[in-house]
Amino acid sequence: MSDLHSPASTGTAGKATDEAPVLATAGADAPSAPAETRRSFLPQSTLLRHLLVLAASAVLAVALLELSSPYQNSQLATLTYYAIAAGGLTVLTGMNGQISLGHGALMAAGAYTTALFLDAEEPLPLPLILVVAVVVATAIGALVGVAAARLHGPYLAGATLALAVGLPGLAIYFHDIFGGEQGLRVRAPRAPEAFGSFIEAVSGNSASNTKWLAYVGTICLLITYFFLANLVRSRIGRTWRAVRDQEVAAELAGINLGAWRVLAFVVSAAAAGLAGGVLAIVVRLAAPSGFTLVLSLALLTAIVIGGLGSLLGALLGSALLVFLPPFVTDLGGDLGLDQTEAAQLAPFVYGVVLIVAMIFAPAGFVGTIRLRWMTAKAKRASARAAGANGG
Amino acid sequence: MTAFAAATVASTLAACGGGDEGGGGTAAEGGENEASDIGVTEDTITLGAHYPLTGVAAPGYSEIPTGVQAYFDCLNQEGGVYGRDVEFVYKDDAYNPTQTSQVTNELVLEDEIFAMMGGLGTPTHSAVVDFLNAEGVPDLFVASGSLTWGDDPETYPYTFGWQTDYMSEGKIIGEYIAENFPEAKVGLFLQDDDFGEDGEAGIRQYIDDQIVAAERYTPGNTSVGPQIAALQAAGADFVVGFNVPSYTALSQLTALQLGYQPQWFYSNVGSDPTLVGGLLNRFSEGKVADAALLDGALTTGYLPTVDQTDNPWIQEFQRIWDECGGEGELTNYRVYGMAQAYTTTQALQAAGQNPTRDGLVEAIEAVGSEWEGPVFAPFRYSEDSHMGTSGMSIERIVGNGSEVVQDVRVTDIGDAPIEEFDKEPATPPANAIPDEEPYEG
Amino acid sequence: MDYFVNVTLTGLTQGMIYSAFALALVLIWRSTRIVNFAQGSMAAATTFIALALIQAGQSYWVALVVALASGFVLGAIVERVIIRPVEGGPELNAVIVTLGLFVAIQAGIAIVFGSSFQSFPTPFGVRGFEVGGTTIPLTPTSLYVIGSVLLVMALLVALFRFTRIGLAMRASAFSQEVARLLGVKVGGMLTLGWGLAAVVGSLSGLLIAGGTFVWPAYMDALIVFGFVAAIIGGLDSPVGAIVGGLILGLALSYVSGYAPRGSALVNISALVILIVVLLVRPGGLFSSTTARRA
């Protein structure tokens, strides 16, 4: 167990990952406002708990990646970059109540940075490149955050929408640097030899490049969610929720609303930058057509459908984005549609799922389940109370 | 050359394959069909492709796979290739490279295709070209005229282009203008990407001094008013467009508003006269009698088009569409798809009875340049080049049809000269099913 | 000089088209406090209905009336069936529902009508007028667009300012509780608001399509610029929508016409313009009140 945070854990994480930190944050966030009054765990114990969850997730992720097919590996790799960005957006929108339709543009910043640095003759080590991607996206996020801090509701939505459409346009204008419309091709870094022997030892599978990218994504995902989970449980997270839920009270209590909003934007931009970096190496390309408005809207969809404010929800929502379209396309094929019709069916079903989910489960997967669970608990409690009275 | 020697043995065998069995040397003596590589079973070969079936790029392009499918369906009815049915799996990427990468993973890792064929688009296909080559999946006949698909077989040994690349097209257009319109003041209307850049580079080799303006539009912008107005202001009386069909229509409408009437020349990609002409013509139903705005415009061609109803290839493709196609009419997009399917069938036949991925690539390199088919001029396939066809005729649009004003000329990228191509056009074999001999090294 | 006139008029026409779309967004915002992202694909749907009628031999005007009527029905049904359950819930849920609707309707259009390009007729000419021997890019069709948009704006202003229904709609959107206490049938007003907004949206769809060509996603570009125009003007104001659309249309046309490779700068310019406006006035140019609450 304990060896999981050692370098061996390099090869970890995937989808299962979410289970753990997510549950933790979900639990943490759930009580949001009222919970503040309850005595919370000591920070150390939270950290410890999250470390345990991280370790468990890592094990689970390795198991998942080694038991699934190469294609599923590639799907999980896709899942990781959606989930990383959605996790960051959860902080901004879920915790702090700011909407962003422009996180795709911040992912583009991370992706282009990664592509440019990997293109160097002697590229820096990958982790360092990803850090640079995070830094660049963070800087842009800070700028946007400052502008966005005084905007509300649809005005914020409009500004970030324009960001989503506008920023990738720079890549076309400065085509000498960014490759214009056809983008920058990314040479995905090769797996180190240690990775091959690690996989060999764990499962006996062959260590393909697809698998390596899935592991890279998973590691990034685990690290991101670990940080975010701790952040959410900290003073900072509580302040964000206060800014969201009790704006006036928070201001009266001496909290600088603007500064906290900017901070939320910065944190979510950092996650988006990392997600963009992972996207670049998984997709092997950074091109404007990969960062259209569709991407930004997909991220927003993921966090709302999953359950706003919960990292587990962001993960589940991302899974929906990855697994639903091929599922529907295959289903359409089984129903006898030709391949064009089946392809057109996928966005239709996707749209309908969004509508139906919001009508019947407005709190998202995680929120709805939590609600059910708490209702059931309350019922049991009252039943027990009734029983005790009866006795 | 060795190809010929080896082929003689097979040719006698193939000779008896003319009947129902169709092409593909079904006659191959005695040998059993084996599951010789990924995606090949005793009775099927699976091919894959990615197209924009939904979203902004879907109009037009989403018709291509229906043409491919119709061709393979008819081919399979006639016995397929060496008795194997060709199964064609195509997926939607919505012209988004991220999605191209996902569906290509699915095609290669899950559906286990033998080869990719006709993957569409430069940015989209760029996302998967490394992956396909790393996995050793033949990446045939990319549907884009970018130079990337074929000028560097060392880096991308499995990738082959198909249509005339934009630079060669630009050269042929440039030479034509220099010879026939030496006094013209030429304006360029260019898509702001490699398509426009390659075309411009080619054209400037011949008429750099005649060009008075080069205006670029970014795909997605709905207004090209300022660009067309700038060409007008620069005094251009001859405009060459390297643009997609919707921008042909937009540029025509904008010119109409401005009362601007230069001689138009649209590159092949943007010119589909049936589509664009039909689009513009139908305004006449709404009171504007501007029928055939495109009348008189020049364009290039490397394939017969649906308006040429007396062309034997079009007649065959029409028959295939009627027998094996789906709803709708035969369009130039569907002809494009069928022509690609035809070349793919040639490649599969050449790869022999029990094809392997590497064998397929080898066969194309060895004999691909000799294939005849609906495409006017030969492909440039060899060990040193994977570029597609290099020739184009120049046509004038008349009504919804076209007439040839300059016969096919061929060239190559860089400063290769332009030469006339005097071979007779090929006629389609029975059922429009090729009958190539297996290449055996 | 000619060039300047041409670029200006092109921008003006384009700006009016943004305005048309922005008006529909303003109407729905005023009557329900929701930004309807499905506006574009709802308008596209009614445009395709009109196109089907025209192709079946009906006149443009019959098709127009049917499209507007079906727009009203579509808007009312959407409000009753899909929006009602999420009204009063978190703001984001309504956003996601309209996004879902946007995607589903657009896919539905492709399934029903196919995804190829189709030309859409206009009842007026598409050749520019001649002024002093030169042709300017102002056509009978663009006059028709400009006139229609201004007329709709005037009707909306009159509706909200001078009629009881308009007042009731504003009240319902502003505070459902208070409106209810005052005897306003809030539910009906919300449905009416959506229906009317969808009519305006349908009209904008038809105006944009006229004299050019359509495909299922043809409204996509306008969703962004129309929304930006509405925000620049201040989401509350029909006049603001017109001004916002014109500012955006003209500015983008100048960028596209005068900056080197300007076409590539159009999207980023929209962002810059929006940010500048919002930094100066966070509620848009025509925001009436200073109160801003989330």
Image (tube, coloured by chain):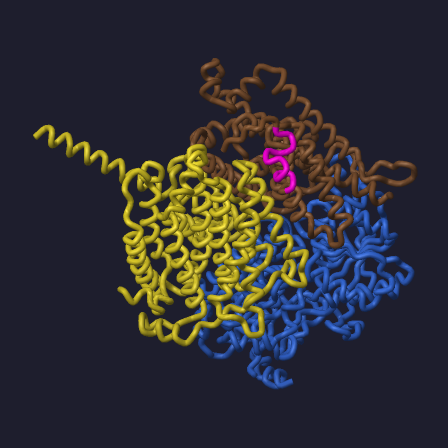
Chain colours: A yellow, B blue, C brown
Q: Is residue C149 left or right of residue A164?
A: right
Q: Residue B104: in sight, yes or no? A: no
User: Which stretch did the figure color magenta?
Assistant: C276-287
Q: Is residue B271 left or right of residue A125?
A: right
Q: In the rendered image, which quarter is residue A248 located in?
A: top left
Q: Position of residue C111 (x, y in %)?
A: 54, 43
Q: Residue C263: in sight, yes or no? A: yes
**Residue drawn at (49%, 63%), measured in percent from left and top?**
A130
| For residue A110, above or below residue C279 | below
Look at the image and tell me in which quarter the N terminus of chain C lies.
Answer: top right
Considering depth in this image, is B269 or A20 the residue closer to the camera?
Answer: A20
Farthest-out residue, left? A391
| For residue B243, above or below residue A389 | below
- Numbered label tally: 0
Q: Is residue C162 left or right of residue A318?
A: right
| For residue C190, above or below residue B264 | above
Q: Position of residue B96 (x, y in %)?
A: 56, 55
Whether B196 is among the magenta residues is no
Considering depth in this image, is C62 or C222 the residue closer to the camera?
Answer: C222
**Residue drawn at (77%, 44%), measured in percent from left and top?**
B253
Q: Position of residue A70 (x, y in %)?
A: 41, 65
Whether C283 is among the magenta residues is yes
**Residue drawn at (33%, 41%), measured in percent from left and top?**
A30
Q: In the rendered image, which quarter is residue C140 located in?
A: top right
**Residue drawn at (80%, 52%), measured in percent from left and top?**
B398
Farthest-out residue, front? A254
Considering depth in this image, is A373 or C217 the residue closer to the camera?
Answer: A373
Q: Position of residue C279 (x, y in %)?
A: 62, 40
